[in-house]
Amino acid sequence: MATIASPGETPERMAGSPDTLERVWQPPGGFIGWFSVVNHRSIGQRYIVTGMFFFILAGIAGLLMRIQLAVPENTFLNPELYNQLFTLHGTTMMFLFAVPIMEGVGIYLVPLMIGARDMAFPRLNAFGYYTFLISGIVLWFSLLIGSAPDGGWFAYVPLTGPRFSPGPGIDFYATLITFLEVAALVAAVELIITIFKMRAPGMSLNRIPLFVWAILVMAFMIVFAMPPLMVASIELMMDRTVGTHFFNPAAGGDPLLWQHLFWFFGHPEVYIILIPGLGMVSAIVATFSRRPFVGHTLVVIALIAIGFLSFGLWVHHMFAVGLPIVGASFFTVASVMIAIPSGIQIFATLATMWSGKVVLKAPMLFVLGFIFIFVLGGITGVMVAAIPFDLQVHDTYFVVAHFHYVLIGGAVFPLFAGFYYWFPKLTGRLLDERLGKWHFWLLFIGFNATFFPMHITGFLGMPRRVYTFLPGLGWDLLNFISTAATFVLAAGIVLFMFNVFKSWRQGQVAGNNPWGAGTLEWAAASPPAPYNFRSTPVVESLEPLWYKQAHDPAEHEIRHVDAANETQDQFGLQDFQRESLGTSPLDAAPEQRIVLPGPSIIPLLTALAVAFTFVGAMIDVVLVPIGAFLVFLVIVAWHWPSREEQAISHPATTSPPGLLPTSVVASNHGSQPPIWGGMLLLLLIESVVFASLISSYLYLRSGAIEWPLGGIEKPDLLLPSINVLVLLASSIPIFIADQGIRKGNQTRLRFGLIAGAVLAIVFLTLKYIEYSSLDYDWTSNAYGSIVWTITGFHSAHVISLLLKTIVVVILAFKGYFTAERNIGVQVNGIYWHFVVVVWIPLFITLYLLPYLLDPL
Amino acid sequence: MTEQTAVHSPTPLERRQQLWLWFGVAAGPLIWAIHLVLAYALQSLSCQWQFLHTTILGMHGLRFTLLVITILAVLLIVYGGVVAYGFWRRFRSLEYGQGDGRREPERGRLPFMAYVGVAFSALFALVTLLMLTPILALDICG
Amino acid sequence: MHSTKNLPHLTWTQKQKPPYRPKLLPGGTVILALFAAGCRQTPINNLTGIPSALDARGPAAASVTELWWIIFGLGTAVFITVIGLMLWIVLRRRVGVEETAVDLRKARSTPLILWGGIVIPFVILMVFLFFSLRTLAFLQQVSAAEPLTIEITGRMWWWEVHYPDEGFATANEIHIPVGRPVQIRGTSADVIHSFWVPQLNGKQDFTPGRLDTLWLQADEPGTYRGLCAEFCGLQHARMQLIVVAQPADQFEAWLEQQRLPAPEPVDALTRRGQQVFLGSACVYCHTVRDTNATGDLGPDLTHLASRRTLAAAILENNPGNLAGWIIDPQHIKPGNLMPPTDLDSADLQALLAYLNSLE
């Protein structure tokens, strides 16, 4: 092992001495600087603060709704406003609070827990935050102008379609949901790659802390759940703006297509929110039971199993639709069996507490509250899996009670537990313990008194989403109790905010590890230095700090990870630029020095350009291509190497002997850089998008008696088949270019890229010829809508591929790429081959299925 | 700085065996997912478009088909479990959890993966098997 | 392989509880003065009991109630056990000091996870699955040789009701014979609605472009409230209906009366009312059979006076409420299709008299 600081030295930095590392990692100051910050802790903090802000807003909306429902026939809110508020409440809680705040906590904590200095794509991280912020602001802005969406967070068509919601409200919803999904996906990619590529040496799969596992599972779920919703919300937008018929039954569309796509996202969404909560609970329970978490591996299995199973439950939101009973019952089985991994999680928590001694501090109180509420919500959750029972309570206040138990119990209580637990890491000070206990009891009692009666209200027949109700139906008293208790709940939240403001300034100073916890984040300073760890730690167990303590009692911390008097990182990370250690995905063996970008305003500009595109889609479709072009420009600016970076001798490109290669050249040294994994994830997301589009096609086909609809001819095969060959052929020169530059052959590189681009242009031209001769378009009927959309979407990919390749060609002619420095070409090639290959299933769907499925 | 080389110790598993290990880990969830989508689509479409409505071995044709593909899926998942169990027996003697991580991290990781595979197979085989209950107990197109 | 499953004590044709007598308040005695101030209507339910899913009045709802009490028992036992265990663990060895040393010995509590988290829950879940499927099989089994079929179309925000075999239409009020399964065939004319009569059966979405069926059977005479359960826009809260379950003879009599054409006006006032009605915009949206009022955007009014409610089971049907509704339907149900009617007092009186004569 490399040098370890001698005992007794404090981690304070030497005064006056220039600290290169500190300077390199320091977030910039000033107004412009604030918008240029890319450090993961700053971004994470912003996510958390913004998420809490939206939590308060949505909470106020909930409070107003409860006041309206306090007594029957109340006129406190008019029905328009009530419907807007419940839509905003749900949409905000789901999309603007729960998912972003969980991602924010992950963005803040994961690098600290895995011993990294930052995340894999810091600028992308900042971009994701601005995207989230802008869409949140625009969504709530819609309330100010009086046209907030009013179709519920689930936005069922046809109510939200152009005919029944002609106003701009649903446009806000459909646009911003799509936009927000970008933010969620970006953060998910970021988290996955960071966890797979940047864990401290020794942190093999079996030594990853449960919280990090939870974040990993959550991120993968986002990758699979969000794209179908994206497809759905884009289809809704198109129905509303350009006259497609995806959801219009009169033209061969199907309202149930929306429900399938929405719930394929919507059910995992609940677990996306829950799973990080489970991770927080696991971390806290281990610390406050003074015991390593019992059944660690079982809980890892449980988390992943929940992740998988949650995708097999979506139909249980659609039992009342009238689907075939046997098929629907398959989903009952999955819904019942998801209780097993959930049970493992709860009993592992209990087993840990049992084997240790419980320290009842505020975080632990919230954990106990979590168990109480979540178990109850889980039990009612199993109940609603029974189809006959669900048909009674579905869309009633029973379900409102159930999911508030699951979500507030499963996410908000763990989140508060996490705040009390990690607040000292964020601020260096502890939250006030006495206020914390008051906060807990107000929240716990207020919550139960609000939501428990709703189970009964639902049984008594009260449907959800009603702005008022008749007196004399037995609902009066129960509703009044719920409303009154809401104020107790709100008082708890207010007390928490007071506690945060008070403790931020005058709280008890915490020190590095106030709870005596075992995971790596507690080895860093509180708050951590901008670079987190001066020297990358090495991990030998699940709780490295405890392991250290047990095996070397003199060492109560892993000193070398934060000691300022370390002159060097033990793995040779350099100080003059932002570097973090890259390790192998499974065993976390050191492989490369990941070079990370510094502060930049471009992520903000990119977010603004993307926002322009989406908001433009709401105003006029013509603005979309303009916005897309702006996005292209900022993305080029984003990736354009600076003058220094263009120099062949740039330190990122050269690897001095004895040092690990940098991520820029790592692919030539047997390990793949983060960007490579990022590209694979992008392809995965794209695959899910295309799969959702193909599913839309198959679903519409399965409900149609004739196909193509409305007497449209079956597609002509000759020209499209030739075109497939053209597209496939375009991969060959791209492959040659890639192989060429690996050997340093510039000619092959340039020739190959240009030849590939030419073939792509031929493909697009033939496509244009084919489609301009068709006698139907996307407004003809649902068949036209789906065919034109799939083709258009794929063509847009080919166009973006062309634009991207043009940039690569320019760089190639500038001599930027070398035998060492060629990751840009490689990544471009991977994307190219993907766009080519994905056309094959699309071709089969669009051109061959009308013939193949005909006998059906 | 020299010690890093130790980390790059060659894996004790050949590439082909690694693939088998991954099969053992992933078989359960993947086959379950594919089977669920397939069975659901088949049931809905068959009842909507009236195919597979013959009688096979005294059973409704759709019921028989679903029965067969479900049993096949369960067998495949169980096979994945058997593969994972083989790896588990082979690796379980390796030190699990603690130790000098930098030297041989796989000592902990391999049994971990094998264990995960066994558990996944057990869970997902059960979930898939239980799908037989509605297939057998309910009116197949009711 | 497939066996029909029966809940031994529940069948689709048997009556079991003593007749339920709805408490009907005297509703007819309303003074005309009230509707001068038509805005002061206060909707109140005094027609039906609580639409409680647990107060089942038919075999379908009863089977679900039975399922509920079983799973409620299971759930309560699980909840009490887990929370009891948790409290016991916490209170058993609580320590107040933070500086407790960490115990790194191998924990011996893994069996707790195995039994508490896996084996016992699995057994309980299997019991749950069994009862759930048994109830489902029971619900699947309903059929009738010659079912009485009622076609219902959900509309924003009321229910259009057709008795196809009888050839008449009504709205927001379904009459069914006691003790006989009735097949409801439903669709929607606009957005998705969900038809739900908690005391008789679970809910069924009515989706445009689809035709879905649901079976209703009441084992006791009574008036049961139904509600729209799927959010369907601005007035989702105000979209309800009532189901009137009657003994066979009363039901036949009701059918008989509904089949009749609208009663002809008998006196001067109702004759004038008919003229007001037929001469106004009412006819564009409403039908009164055998007159030139043939609109189909609003409820069929042929036998309006025989119905017990107005505005989709929100208001009791009495002259005061009817007057208030006609004068300003947007007050009680903002956003509905019916515009306010501007009539002088005499015309209004006549119109009311006419509408009230449509027994």
Image: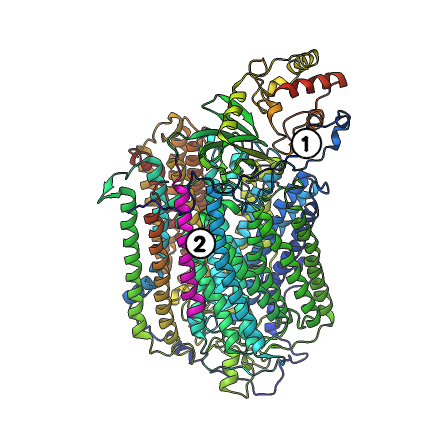
- Mark 2 surroundings within 10 Å by alpha-carbon count, few (fewer than 14), some (14 through 19), many (20 or more): many
Q: Secondary structure at mark 2?
A: helix
Residue C313 drawn at (x, y percent): 61, 33
* Residue drawn at point x = 58 percent, y = 67 percent: A367
Label 1 to label 2: alpha-carbon separation: 49 Å
Residue A254 or A710: which is nearer the viewer?
A254
Q: Amino acid at mark 2?
A: Ser
* Residue drawn at point x = 25 percent, y = 38 percent: B54
Mark 1 falls within which chain?
A: C
Task: Name the residue tied to disc 2.
Answer: A335
Q: Secondary structure at mark 1?
A: loop
Screen quadrant of the C terminus of chain A: top left
Residue B38 drawn at (x, y percent): 34, 47
Mark 2 falls within which chain?
A: A
Residue A480 or A565: which is nearer the viewer?
A480
Residue A313 drawn at (x, y percent): 44, 51
Task: Name the residue tied to disc 1.
Answer: C26
Q: Is residue A28 above or below residue A89?
A: below
Question: Can residue A641 be seen?
Answer: no
Q: Amino acid at mark 1?
A: Pro
- Asked if the stretch drawn in magenta spans residue C309, the answer is no
Whether labels 1 and 2 belong to a single chain: the reply is no
Residue A39 or A634: which is nearer the viewer?
A39
Residue A427 or A759: which is nearer the viewer?
A427
Q: Which residues fall within the magenta stretch?
A: C114-143
Nearer the observer, disc 1 or disc 2?
A: 1
Residue C153 drawn at (x, y percent): 51, 30
Q: Is residue A443 above or below residue A781?
A: below
Q: Is residue B66 above or below residue C48?
A: below
